[in-house]
Amino acid sequence: PQTIHLADYTPPAYWVEDVHLTFRLAPTATRVLSRIRFVPNSDAPGRFFLHGEGLTLISAKINGAPVSPAFVEDGLTCAVPDGPFTWEAEVEINPQANTALEGLYRSGGMYCTQCEAEGFRKITYYPDRPDVMAPFTVRVEGSDPVLLSNGNPVAQGDGWAEWHDPWRKPAYLFALVAGDLVAHRDSFTTRSGKDVDLAIWVRKGDLHKCAFGMDALKRSMDWDERVYGREYDLDVFNIVAVDDFNAGAMENKGLNVFNASAVLASPDTATDANFERIESIIAHEYFHNWTGNRITCRDWFQLCLKEGLTVFRDQQFSADERSAPVKRIDDVLALRARQFREDNGPLAHPVRPESFVEINNFYTATVYEKGAELIGMLKRLVGDENYARALDLYFDRHDGEACTIEDWIAVFEETTGRDLSQFKTWYSQAGTPRLDMTDSFADGTYTLTFRQHTPATPGQPDKAPMVIPIAVGLLSPNGSECVPTTLLEMTKAEQSFTFEGLEEKPVPSILRGFSAPVIVTRKSDNAERAFLLAHDTDPFNRWEAGRALAKDALVRMVKEGAAPDAAFIDALGQVLADDTLDPAFRALVLHLPGQDDLAQTLFDAGVTPDPIAIYAACDSMADAIATTLESQLASLFDAMQVPGTYSPDAEAAGKRALANAALSLLSRRDNGARAQVQFDGADNMTQQLAGLGALIKQGKGDEALQAFYEQWHDDRLVLDKWFGLQCSLAKPDEAANVAMTLTAHPDFEWKNPNRFRSVLGALASNAAGFHHPSGAGYTVMADWLIKLDPVNPQTTARMITVFETWRRYDADRQALIAAELDRIANTPDLSRDTAEMVSRIRG
Ligand code: B3K
Ligand code: ZN
């Protein structure tokens, strides 16, 4: 397979002026008729080439006369006249046979599409590249009552509908949906007074699960007007829920297609966490209308241009709608769990990669979440006002264009007059910078000295210093803040900053709000951490101090067999008792660091992590917390019960999060008694599932699991939870077996990505179970990856990242994993997606 390089970009030889498509839908033989007006690009003359994959060409014409194109790699070429011309083609495709869920496919009896990144070429011959933008007119013919495509409805009749999207767009934003669907409808009036018809399309039984998504959509539309001045630009906005979907959702112009799990929610079937995720994904896809659709990417190397910015925007939205500090902590937890993990292993790549084999393999935490961190740093460095001005300039200047990171940086340079060439290193250099700090105090002057260092990553042995915005505050030893948050701009490998006029040596609170995506390697002592946990005015660093204490205690338990640290548990008790603190914040402090995070921490400290020992340490720490704080946890559990009708709002959800964190610990003391009561009496999924989880962990879950199954086996999304919980909470020596048994369950529809992930993804999330020394977890994983690859390469290639940390472990585990990776690599006809991933991981 061919490697594509950023440096090889050339503009298209032909532009597209407009596109007319007709779909004659039939499950196994859909006909797609295209009429496309091409205009030569006089700046970059070249061969006429159209992408196409798996298409049966029925006929082709140029300016009305039949032609016989030549089939070449990835598409076709044809002799064409000088000047503009009209290409017409008819192709046949088989949606029913499309299990890869890319292009036009069937899901639960409906037709739907997924074209990003390069799926449109599986629908018809076309220059399937994001810099070719055109208006589309689409006629859909089929027997289904609902026939949808992008843009505005033009006309419809019996068995057909016509749509027109006036906004020029790349083919990856094309969408078509047809099915026996019903709509939850609403409307939104934009600030200039335009009425937009909104609809969420679902199967009949799901209509009661749309209200929250619709509310989130309207709040997103309002927020984008208020905060970014961005108004919606079509008469309709449609969202469709589909069961079979590789990603979370897709921002097709005017017709977003969603994984059902990312839009459907009702109190009895969705948890607080599901509601929060739905809100942020609805917002994310909606925000793409400006950052992605109106302004798109020149080529796929620029993916972070739309994704980093849109993630940043959805994070801002959630922070505004909920609690900003809690949102920041959640985002950093996710960044560390997924992006730092990626950056530390064989899959490390820059936010703007420079080469790829299969672009779908680069929809990563680095492009998305680190990409969003870069926007946040830029905003911090230039200030809020300049950020707003730069964004206005970006939208003004580039509306309707396909852009690059250079275009993006330029609007900031022009707005501020700043040279951002060093900042651009963040886009090209992979790896997480390590930031060390020392301090000194003399004659009222406090000096902070920072050193930065980025470890080598694949293909990048030497790293340049980055510009790192370090937000710092100083506290007096009495606990009051003597220097409020100040932004230091580090640009050199080593750099000092001074604060004058201080009476005594302060306690530093560095990297407030997690002002840059770096790892602070400075070893502070536990007394200082406890002080910050009690006194820091920055909520993020307050939580961070608690986390550092927890990690230190757990690492000592694993490394030295130390007992659970009483001082840590005492500090925890004080946080829990502080009723001025948001319950959601206290719940976060109460959650112990993840076992995968601890494995990396140990590895970084030169210790080969043993997942079983880490599991045991976390278990005995939880026991010690439960024992020491039992009565406090019991009163907290009672105090945090939310009376009345369930509402997914942040305040109520925060209380339930704290109550459920307490429940999980208390169940160790009461043998699951409270959990059973909660499970039996729950009127919402958040509490039912927390009760079930606590029972499973106590080895008392069998009856509840059975009851849960009987109650919910007809609800796909809830059944995913039933599968998932059993795998993620299984004991280390049972996990592989549980997963294997569940894959034999009649409801294990393995071709459905959500169901596949509910078992195999959940197994991998169970670190001690997955990494059990028997290797059984590795084998069951590899067996299923090999089985899924020919059916759905994208989901396989994503799931194989469960092995990306393999170099951390001992020689025995490494040998077991290497053997499984080799078994996968040697499978005949492996997909390009999985082949690329396995070779990068194996190294
Ligand atoms: N842009 C889509 C992701 C498409 C995934 C392609 N493999 C969803 C999003 O980021 O909004
Ligand atoms: Zn996105």
Image: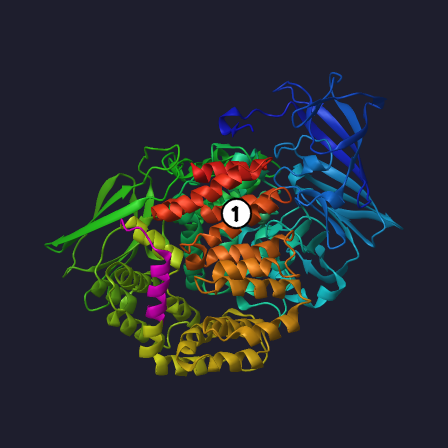
Q: Quadrant of the N terminus?
A: top right
Segment tinted magenta in the rendering = 606-622
290 vs 628: above or below: above
Circle count: 1
Residue 561: x, y in percent? 25, 63
Q: In the figure, 769 relative to 353: above or below?
A: below
- Please check the rendered image and state whether residue 810 is part of the magenta-colored stretch, yes or no: no
Q: Among all residues in the image, which is located at the extreme front?
A: 774
Magenta includes 619?
yes
Q: Three-letter amino acid code at disc 1? A: Ala
What x and y, as percent, mark residue 566? 25, 72
Which residue is found at the position 32% from the left and 72% from the top? 572
Q: Quadrant of residue 496?
A: top left
The color scheme shown is rainbow
Dividing the picture into quadrants, the one containing residue 271 is bottom right
Q: Is residue 380 above or below residue 763?
A: above
- Outermost residue toward the right? 158
Identity of the residue drawn at 25% across and 48% down: 436
Q: Decide if residue 746 is on the left or right side of residue 773.
A: right
**Helix, strand or loop for disc 1:** helix
376 relative to 494, above or below: below
Q: Nearer the viewer, residue 632 or 714?
A: 714
- Quarter of image, res 426: top left
Q: Is residue 240 left or right of residue 763?
A: right
Image coordinates for residue 659, horizontal then vertical, percent: 45, 76
The location of residue 837, given as percent across then percent down, is 50, 39
For mark 1, what is the residue? 782
